[in-house]
Image: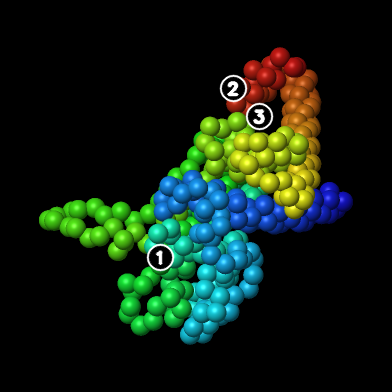
Amino acid sequence: MATIQTSLANSIDASVDKAKLDEVAKKLVKHKIILAEILKACVEEFRNYSIPFIENQCIVGDVRMNEVSIDQDVIDADSRIVGSDTEDNSHSEGLIRYDLVFDACVPNTEEIIRLIINVEIQVDVDPGYSIITRGIYYLARLISRQKGTVFTGTDYGKIRKVYSIWICPDPRKEKRNSIAEYGFTQQKVIGKVDEPVENYDKMKAIIINLNDDGIDNRSDIIRLLSTLLSTNESVEKRKEILENDFHIPMTKEIEEGMQDMCNYGEALQRYGEQRGLEQGLKRGLERGLEQGRQEGIDISRLETIRNLKETLKMTTKQVMDAMRLSEEEKKKYAKMV
């Protein structure tokens, strides 16, 4: 019973530490200078602009994190907070929460695009579904919730483009240090089709797969985010990289956040080691019980063979044939009699 209670307590502790780690990661990514780096590296509309310009001129309003929005089913319910809601709460579609949500204005245009940044700190690297599938669902929700706020009736031409950017610090080995983009493309099946790209290019999902080894990666954005969100590298080394290579001012908030990443990361690592030890002990105990059971069977069978040989004056082979032992078992016990 004590083992079960310890295991349960450890699981709860791990859940708490993961939630704290996730929260710290969101707060670190939430800084506009970090978001500007992500926009420049991953969002095509901003690739030709400087980080300071994107940070100061393109990110519109506040970046909201884990905040409850007004019910989506109420007409014009969030018109006062366009671009800031982090929760979709529809009676028909259910509740979903976004990690970070903000709007960005495309330079030299009046176009506004909505972006959500999802920071996934995953203990379980295989949640049972593809991250891109979940990203597509999030994009669909961001599109559907524009009705009644961005456009009304059938005025679908006003739909704003949306992005869902997923940062995965601990992906599977084969996906580490990679960036992938998913979206709508036009494919001509029959005949001539010349639909303007802006009519269907309304949603993009981007997956950024990191790794602590990415601190030495040649991709700037992977190196930056891997450094920022590392749970293994020292805070001093990470500060040096961020300040010298990316010119990111080291505020007290960022420094404390990176230290918290290390602390909660170590806690999760200890949980993983404890869980591995418990599983190893359990397997060892199971192997021990199985071995003991088999030894008991062997002793019993050997005693039976010896007794029958003595009582019935039979050979070892005759006794084992009568016991209907397999050929493998006959060879085994013939050596032991």
Front label number (2 vs 1): 1
Looking at the picture, which amino acid does disc 2 mark? Glu
**Measured Cα–Cα span from mark 2 to mark 1:** 80 Å
- Helix or strand or loop: what does disc 1 sit on? loop
Q: Is residue 252 visible?
A: yes
Q: Residue furthest left?
A: 191
> Height in image: 84 above or below 123?
below
What quarter of the picture does the C terminus occupy?
Answer: top right
Image quadrant where residue 87 sits: bottom right
Q: Which residue is mark 1?
A: 111
Looking at the picture, which amino acid does disc 3 mark? Met
Looking at the image, residue 303 sits to the left or right of residue 201; the answer is right
Q: Is residue 226 visible?
A: no
Residue 41 image point, x, y percent: 49, 45
**Measured Cα–Cα span from mark 3 to mark 1:** 86 Å
Residue 301 image point, x, y percent: 74, 28
**Residue placed most toward the observer, 174 or 335:** 174
**Residue placed most toward the observer, 92 or 38:** 38
Please tell me the numbered disc located at residue 327: 2
Instruction: Count neighbours of disc 3 (C-alpha within 10 A) and say few if under 14, some if 14 to 19, many if 20 or more.
Output: few
Residue at horizontal 79%, vertical 53%? 13
Looking at the picture, which amino acid does disc 1 mark? Glu
- Helix or strand or loop: what does disc 3 sit on? loop
Residue 126 image point, x, y percent: 57, 47
**Measured Cα–Cα span from mark 3 to mark 2:** 12 Å
Q: Which residue is mark 3?
A: 323
